[in-house]
Amino acid sequence: MAHPGAIPAHRPLDPAKFRDPRSTAKGEPRASVAPIGLRTLWFNTGTLCNITCRGCYIESSPRNDALSYLTLGEVEAFLEQAAALPGASLREVGFTGGEPFLNRDLPAMLRAVLARPGGLRALVLTNAMRPMRRRERELKALRDEFGAARLVLRVSLDHYDAAVHDLERGEGSFARALDGLVWLAREGFTVHVAGRAAFGREDEAGLRAGFARLFAAHGIPIAAADPVALTLFPEMDASADVPEITTACWGILGRRPEEMMCATSRMVVRHRGAARPSVVACTLLPHDPRFRLGATLAEADRPVALNHPHCARFCVLGGAACSR
């Protein structure tokens, strides 16, 4: 039996695809993305989570420690590295998991970000359940000291209908997440919501209308039409075949390399058993060794070949981004 923290390879249906970082299965030059300056630095605080979702792209769960907890000292060290990068213009620091609030250092990590010169924003991706609620006092202290505008809590709410949401995250999870979201709104925090674009049967307009009704009913000040305040992420179906992205695709699709997440962001992770953290290309690919770019942000400041189905499905074709 596989270790409970093991991560599947998620190889494409066609095994010839996404193999060579330089060229596609058809021999065409593969697209890559060159860094244009670090604007968003992500920390995966660990893959442990208080719930188990059916479609979690990194299979976070109460037993999955494939990515170990980062420490406050490690976060502070990488913040110093970011400040020293030539041409860097860091604006935002994001925390994801797992459930970030399971990491006891998270409030101190947030303080380390918010206290730095330059007015950095901090973004936390959370399910807003018990781990977050246990940190209410620390969160309110950060809000009072640094202001609500610079600390954003993005709550995962897959759908506006409880029954649909609970199919993915477990019975009763919608009610617990909504309760946390309402508490954040009532306490004056800046709140965003992350949903899923193809999770229900509606089109995007229908989904946003449904979320708007939910927000209005509970006094949650989120503009459902705002694609940042309500982010609807595309599905990441590992069983669906996707095309490889060639250099010609930029012009064909009307997209630009500098629009991709990996042009302006990197993520720090600590793999289980590793002596120290490493830097990966983006939040979607913490486990694939081909996307481990080095032990420092300086080493990771290099082009990224779009050599994974997620690069095509989520970023280039899906048009999604984990940050603003």
Image (tube, rainbow, N blue to C red):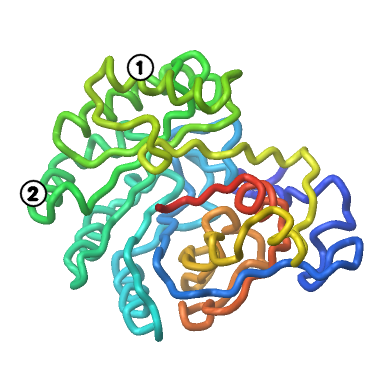
Between marks 2 and 1 in the image, the one whose residue lies nearer the viewer:
1
Image-quadrant location for residue 250:
bottom right
Is residue 152 shown above or below 182? below
Is residue 182 shown above or below 282? above
Q: Amino acid at mark 2?
A: Asp
The residue located at (12%, 56%) in the rendering is 146
Image-quadrant location for residue 119:
bottom left
Q: Residues within 10 Å of mark 2 (few under 14, many from 20)?
A: few
* Residue closer to the observer: 318 or 81: 318
* Residue closer to the observer: 148 or 107: 148
Is residue 71 shown above or below 131? below
Q: Which residue is mark 2?
A: 144
Q: Position of residue 192 (x, y in %)?
A: 33, 38
Is residue 178 shown above or below 241? above
* Residue closer to the observer: 176 or 226: 226
Q: Position of residue 56 (x, y in %)?
A: 57, 39
Q: CA distance from mark 2 to mark 1?
A: 30 Å
Q: Amino acid at mark 1?
A: Arg
Tell me the SS state at disc 2.
helix
Q: Which mark is residue 213?
A: 1
Tell me the SS state at disc 1.
helix
Report whether 94 appears left or right of 257: left
The residue located at (89%, 57%) in the rendering is 16
Residue 155 shows up from this direction = no
Q: Which mark is residue 85?
A: none
Whether tag 2 and tag 1 are in contact, CB under 8 A, the answer is no
Q: Position of residue 317 (x, y in %)?
A: 66, 48
Residue 192 shows up from this direction = yes
Of the numbered discs 2 and 1, the one sitting upstream in the chain is 2
The residue located at (38%, 37%) in the rendering is 226
The residue located at (77%, 39%) in the rendering is 240
